[in-house]
Amino acid sequence: MSENDQTTITVNMTDYQLHPACLLFPDMDDAELAKLAQSIKENGQRLPIIEYKGMILDGKNSLRACEI
């Protein structure tokens, strides 16, 4: 697989439960989230969304941005 290959996965935030540790970090405001969404559209999702025991541990804002 070359670095130009891309895989698109469609997810819905309501399909996931947030891990309690994830809730220690604040949600991005609408402007920050829009900037992140644009960056992901232009550059791709660079950092993985971390899941632990079926719950989002890290990356909730990235997941939200991917839904925009």
Image (cartoon, grey):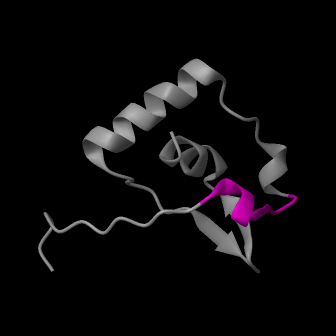
Q: Which residue is drawn at 53% across and 46% down?
A: 67
Point out residue 27 in the picture as x, y percentages from the top left corner. Answer: 72, 35
Towards the viewer: 10 or 20 = 10
Q: Decide: is 45 above or below 16.
A: above
Point out residue 53 in the picture as x, y percentages from the top left corner. Answer: 76, 80
Point out residue 17 in the picture as x, y percentages from the top left corner. Answer: 80, 64
Q: Which residue lies furthest to the top in this view?
A: 31
Task: Let me know if residue 57 is in the magenta part.
Answer: no
Q: With 32 as the anchor, is 57 left or right in this view?
A: right
Q: With 20 as the anchor, is 33 left or right in this view?
A: left
Q: With 39 as the anchor, is 57 left or right in this view?
A: right
Task: Let me know if residue 15 is in the magenta part.
Answer: yes
Quadrant containing the N terminus in the rendered view: bottom left
Point out residue 33 in the picture as x, y percentages from the top left corner. Answer: 55, 30
Q: Decide: is 17 above or below 29.
A: below
Q: How many labels does the image show?
A: 0
Q: Residue furthest right?
A: 20
Q: Which residue is drawn at 61% across and 43% down?
A: 61
Image quarter of residue 16? bottom right
Q: Residue at x 61, y 53 (%)?
A: 59
Q: With 62 as the anchor, is 58 left or right in this view?
A: right
Q: Residue at x 13, y 63 (%)?
A: 4
Image quarter of residue 19? bottom right
Q: What stretch is highlighted in magenta?
A: 12-20
Image quarter of residue 18? bottom right
